[in-house]
Image (spheres, rainbow, N blue to C red):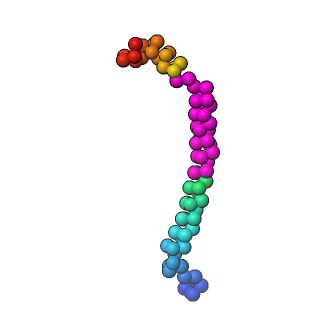
Amino acid sequence: MTSSALTKPQMRGLLAKRLRFHIVGAFAVSLGVAAFYKFAVAEQRKKAYADFYRNYDSMKDFEEMKKAGIFQSAK
């Protein structure tokens, strides 16, 4: 077995090549996670808040809390 049969390992530019690959992969994964969060969590939350405040009557809620004795300054 001679040493000429083995190929030399790539040493020059190896870090740059691997970083380029991993940075592109990390960017793609982060975009995917951000899109998933936006559509799975944020949009549902905005819809739930909009549904709640569509028929929300703050004065009615205030009167119920006042009647329950929550507020000390409002009689």
Q: Residue at x 52, y 69 (%)?
A: 19
Q: Residue at x 54, y 65 (%)?
A: 23
**From the viewer's perspective, is 13 left or right of 74?**
right
Q: Residue furthest left?
A: 73
Quadrant in which residue 68 is drawn: top left
Task: Please name whichever residue, 70 or 30, is drawn nearer the observer in this view of the structure.
Answer: 70
Quadrant in which residue 44 is drawn: top right
Q: Quadrant of the C terminus?
A: top left
Image height of 70 relative to 37, above or below:
above
Q: Is 37 one of the magenta-colored residues?
A: yes
Q: Residue at x 58, y 30 (%)?
A: 53
Task: Please name whichever residue, 3 or 20, is drawn nearer the observer in this view of the structure.
Answer: 20
Q: Position of residue 34 (x, y in %)?
A: 57, 51
Q: Quadrant of the N terminus?
A: bottom right
Classified by dominant secondary structure, the portion drawn in magenta counts as helix
Q: Residue at x 63, y 45 (%)?
A: 39
- Magenta region, residue range: 33-58
Q: Position of residue 42 (x, y in %)?
A: 58, 42
Q: Is 13 one of the magenta-colored residues?
A: no
Image height of 23 relative to 58, above or below:
below
Q: Position of residue 13 (x, y in %)?
A: 51, 78
Q: Position of residue 20 (x, y in %)?
A: 55, 70
Image height of 47 relative to 63, above or below:
below
Quadrant in which residue 49 is drawn: top right
